[in-house]
Amino acid sequence: QDAQEKKLESIEAANLETAQKLETMDAQLGEIKALLQAQAELAAAEAAKKGEEIPTGLDEEEQVYQAMQRAAGVATDQPLKFTDFTIAFESFFLKGDDLAPEVKRGMKIALDRENKNRVSKLSWIKFYRAWKGSEL
């Protein structure tokens, strides 16, 4: 009985910690959106000075993915290695804190279904939309 109660307390504590991290991640997402918007406006202004056109109308999830690609030094037409994705995700959404091992495994399963150690833009978009849609 005591062992079950301790296990339940441990589970409840983990659930609370997860909920708090998700709230923090949502707040950080707002900060990232503002940063991406500022970067897009700056890029548009620089392109206008040069007489160039830049793609506009990228969805939020595409902007985040491109920011992670830039942070990892990956061309925007290439997928991210899972390790680069993890570091970028931790940097952007967790302010540098490490993902819990079980969360990292879950993300690996969700984002790299073919186990190629790559995160494509499409798998990120699917994951991101499901995550935002879950309102966690």
Image (spheres, rainbow, N blue to C red):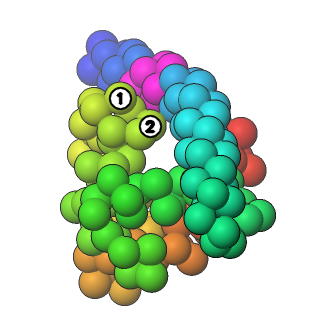
Q: Residue at x 58, y 54 (%)?
A: 46
Q: Residue at x 39, y 63 (%)?
A: 69
In this orientation, does residue 59 appear? yes
The percent position of residue 91, horizontal first and vertical second, equals: 33, 39
Residue 6 against residue 53 in the figure, above or below: above
Foreground residue among 43 and 121? 43
Residues drawn in magenta: 14-22
Foreground residue among 105 and 68? 68
- Secondary element at tag 1: loop
- Say what amino acid the circle numbered 2 marks: Phe
61 sits left or right of 65 in the view: right
Count the numbered circles shown: 2
Foreground residue among 61 and 73? 73
Q: Which mark is residue 93?
A: 2
User: Which residue is labeled 1 in the image?
Assistant: 95
The percent position of residue 129, horizontal first and vertical second, equals: 68, 58
Q: Residue at x 57, y 29 (%)?
A: 31
21 magenta-colored: yes
Residue 23 against residue 93 in the figure, above or below: above
- Say what amino acid the circle numbered 1 marks: Lys
Most prominent secondary structure in the magenta stretch? helix
In this orientation, does residue 19 appear? no
- Secondary element at tag 2: helix
* Marks 2 and 1 close (CB-CB < 8 Å): yes
Residue 23 against residue 118 in the figure, above or below: above
The percent position of residue 134, horizontal first and vertical second, equals: 70, 47
